[in-house]
Amino acid sequence: MYTFAHISDIHLGPLPRLSVRELASKRITGFINWHRNRRKHMQADTLDLLLGDMRLRAPEHLMITGDLVNLATPIEIRLAGEWLRSIGEPLDTTVVPGNHDAYVPGAHHRSVREWYPFIAGDEGPVDWPDEEHVFPTYRRRGPIAIIGCSTSNATIPFSAAGYFSARQARELANHLKRAKDEGLFRVVLIHHPPVRGAASSHKRMIGIRRFAAALSIGGAELVLHGHTHLNTVYTLKTHHGPVPVMGIASASQGPGGHKPPAAYNLFSLTGEPGAWNLACDRYGLTPAADAIVHEQRHVLHGDATAIPAQEFLQPVD
């Protein structure tokens, strides 16, 4: 059995002291939003509790689908890199960026460069490459292929839309076909939900049709996303059959907000090509914010009895 976990929308805080020059941009809207809303509910203690529980269950790989920072200032990006190095090794952790990681022009480049060891594909250069086309990335871990896409780009104030390009769609389809030929279970990571209606119009993903076409050409077994701060399960119809698409609450969200408290998904995979068995157990923060407990199990592929539940369903305080 192979296990992997998914968290998203870390929004590491608190915000650093910002200069007038840094605030003279779209960052001013995010700064106000943080102090009016997110500061009250985004808590480091919550994130630590969530990660501590996850470590006890010892997933073999961790996948993070963006928004590690809030306003993408240089100090936030650097501290997020330090945080990544503190929670795991690049071989065991895969990251794709979110819209907050590309909050203003130039931020996406700085974020990806700083976090590159956790982003780079297996065949990519060890050091930060000169070329712009980093995504999609391709990583093979055990029986799975992890294909990382980017929808993060700088947008105008009051917009959090993502963009998925035609070039990425073509390369994604090729990666998916390659992974199938290698007999791997294919997991696609992306920040914005690639599902119509999953996010409001100013937060939507532009290029949903291109993404769906790539999956129809190449096939996939699972798509993981963030962005909405919600625990969701959707299905994308493709020529190869339905593909589950799963979102997760923010890993730093405390109780009392209008979004669900922090959670992570733990996936358990058994089987072989053409006969995969995949279960997903969601663990989340209690209303008292004093423990992480099991909340729900989904069987996404195959037979539920093929994956022992008792090992994963016991709550941990």
Image (cartoon, helix red, strand yellow):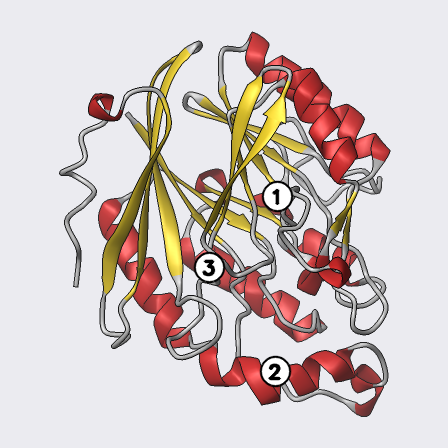
* Displayed quadrant of residue 309: top left
- Mark 1 to mark 3 CA distance (whole Å): 22 Å
- Report x, y in % for residue 279: 33, 33
Residue position for label 3: 249
> What amino acid is labelled 1 in the image?
Ile
- Report x, y in % for residue 297: 29, 42
Q: Residue at x 78, y 73 (%)?
A: 158
Identify the mark at residue 33; answer none if there is no mark: none
Which of disc 3 and disc 2 is earlier in sequence?
A: 2
* Displayed quadrant of residue 127: top right
Residue position for label 1: 119
Mark yes or no: residue 309 visible: yes
Mark 2 vs mark 1: in front: 2
Residue position for label 2: 34
Q: Residues within 10 Å of mark 3 (few under 14, many from 20)?
A: many
Q: 8 or 200: which is nearer to us?
A: 200
Mark 2 vs mark 3: in front: 3
Tell whether 14 sits left or right of 301. Answer: right
At mark 3, the secondary structure is: loop
Q: Residue at x 66, y 50 (%)?
A: 197
- Report x, y in % for residue 272: 38, 12
Mark 1 vs mark 3: in front: 3
Tell whether 262 sits left or right of 116. Answer: left
Q: Residues within 10 Å of mark 2 (few under 14, many from 20)?
A: many
Mark yes or no: residue 175 visible: no
Q: Residue at x 52, y 84 (%)?
A: 39
**Marks 2 and 3 close (CB-CB < 8 Å):** no
- Report x, y in % for residue 94: 53, 43
At mark 2, the secondary structure is: helix
Q: Residue furthest bottom?
A: 20
- Mark 2 to mark 3 CA distance (whole Å): 17 Å
